[in-house]
Amino acid sequence: MAITTPRPWLGSYADGVPHDIDEQTGSLFDLVRESVEQYGDQVALEFFERTTSYAELGEQIERAAEGLRLLGVQKGDPVAIVLPNCPQHIVAFYAVLRLGGIVVEHNPLYTPRELRHQFEDHGARVVIAWDKVVDTIQAFPADVAVDAIVSVDVTRAMPFLTRALLRLPIAKARASRAALTTKVRGTTPWRRLVASERIDAHIIGPEASDVALIQYTSGTTGSPKGATLTHANLTTNAAQSRAWVPEIERGTAVVYAVLPMFHAYGLTLCLTFAMSMGARLVLFPRFDPELVLKVVRKRPPTFLPAVPPIYDRLTKAAAAEGVSLEGIRIAISGAMPLSPDVVAPWEAATGGYLVEGYGLSECSPVLMANPVAPNRRAGTVGLPLPSTEVRVVDPDAPQTDVAPGAEGELIVRGPQVFSGYWRKPDETEAVFVPATDGGADWFRTGDIVSIDAEGFVRVVDRIKELIITGGFNVAPSEVEEAVRSHPDVEDCAVIGLPDDHSGEQVVAVVVLKPGATLDEPGIREHARGELTAYKVPKRVVAVDDLPRSLIGKVLRREVRNRLLNG
């Protein structure tokens, strides 16, 4: 599609970054198959020092795809993946896509309630799950029950010696093993899946226009929903990311996966971008500074996507332990604001760049980033990526642009922008502004921004009431439902308040039932049984009443302002 809107930011692009990228006509599976063919002998994955070559990765994908086919997976079927970062996650992701199936990513630390809600929505009948969460899935009610569970023991991807140490008859080893794996029944073990024959090469795979992924997000309206992303959306975003860093040669990068790959940010920069680059992807099941620095001593990353708290903790831990961070050429920060107080020590320690970007799950997710160049601009989220258009409009009249430099709602369009939410046409319609130039419709981000004369975008505020803590989206309504179910709570409003460490902290403001007294630890513990850890309120504040609109809706923004102003 020809771009018809002005793009003042193009003059601020770093040298070698194209204004536009070519249309992506292949699938995500084609993307990884190309790397398998070109870099077969090179390391694709590293996990606790055990490596998998691209040729081995390709073989495992073909065999896992055949195993899934025998379990009944067909083109267009959603398949749930509930895994931490591990080699099996990469194989499972591409095996589903090899069949033309739709991947549905899930946080393996979600509570039974949270997981069940998503399974009720997408309806997957086959799930590939960490053995630690198999019991949760098997306990689903009959109307959500799945047909087949492939159970994954992540320790089987570790080196033999590491696995042997986990079996030592000592308390620490037993505890470590118990945290990583457990015995399950009634499943298909992963090892059996990848022992299948190779899939028939003539089985038709996906096309660029097919849906590849359902990525759950709180979106711009507060309640979790599945953003449907096509192969074209995701291959485009990988291509845009490659174009943004032209100095990285394919087949040479070392990328650390410290971000969870079930999150849109980690998925794109690790599962798709890194694999398309023929990179060596070093997988960490969770972020542990000590574990990361152990690998840095031997092979530092050349490209590190993360969030500000990770950069801050790594910088301090490396200084404390005397570990050099030199050689980390490019670090991309997203999901929450990046403070100059984090950037300066990181760049001094690495000799490389740490730049901030911006995106949403609905946009695959990356929309913009600061140039990896001296003209990067602290306090901004950078410039729109190649082939991306943005406008700043009046949020009450989204067809109307605001004056240049003025604040307004950011609306966007480009080949990485999704087409809608899974089975939610009304919610989909609500987030698009019809185009008047014959081009694609514009997606409403719900963020208030300003754009300066050089095209740098500064996020000023959010229209949406979404809370972003530690890089994760939290829907206030979901937390309110959990808190409101406590027997002492009459009503509840959940808001985000500024936090130096996580960006925002989740705060529950409650009205107690007559005669009840505030039991903050008890309310938090109750919520912990319903919600994953990052959604649990860090504070609970009791008030006499909550401000409401004329129709009775709680005004969360006013609640937030009252707390901020004392």
Image (spheres, rainbow, N blue to C red):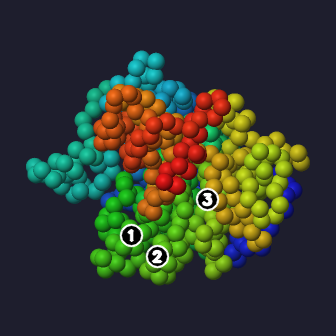
Relative to 173, does residue 455 appear above or below in the rendering? Answer: below
Contact (CB < 8 A) between labels 2 and 1? yes
Label 3 packing within 10 angstroms: few (<14), some (14-19), many (20+): many
Contact (CB < 8 A) between labels 3 and 1? no
Label 1 packing within 10 angstroms: few (<14), some (14-19), many (20+): many
Identified by mark 2, the residue type is: Trp
Distance from Cα at disc 3 to Cα at disc 2: 20 Å
Please give the residue where the numbered disc 1 appears in the rendered image. Answer: 314
Q: Residue 381: in sight, yes or no?
A: yes
Relative to 484, does residue 23 appear above or below in the rendering? Answer: below
Rendered residue at 42%/17% (across/down): 142
What kind of element bears circle 2?
Answer: helix
Distance from Cα at disc 3 to Cα at disc 1: 22 Å
- Classify residue 148 as left or right of residue 520: right
Among the two numbered marks 3 and 2 on one chain, the one whose residue lies closer to the N terminus:
2
Please give the residue where the numbered disc 2 appears in the rendered image. Answer: 346
Label 2 packing within 10 angstroms: few (<14), some (14-19), many (20+): many
What kind of element bears circle 1?
Answer: helix
Please give the residue where the numbered disc 3 appears in the rendered image. Answer: 358
Rendered residue at 40%/33% (across/down): 512
Distance from Cα at disc 2 to Cα at disc 1: 9 Å
Residue 320 coordinates in the image, percent (x, y): 30, 76
Identified by mark 3, the residue type is: Tyr
Identified by mark 1, the residue type is: Leu
Among the two numbered marks 2 and 1 on one chain, the one whose residue lies closer to the N terminus:
1
Residue 561 coordinates in the image, percent (x, y): 56, 50
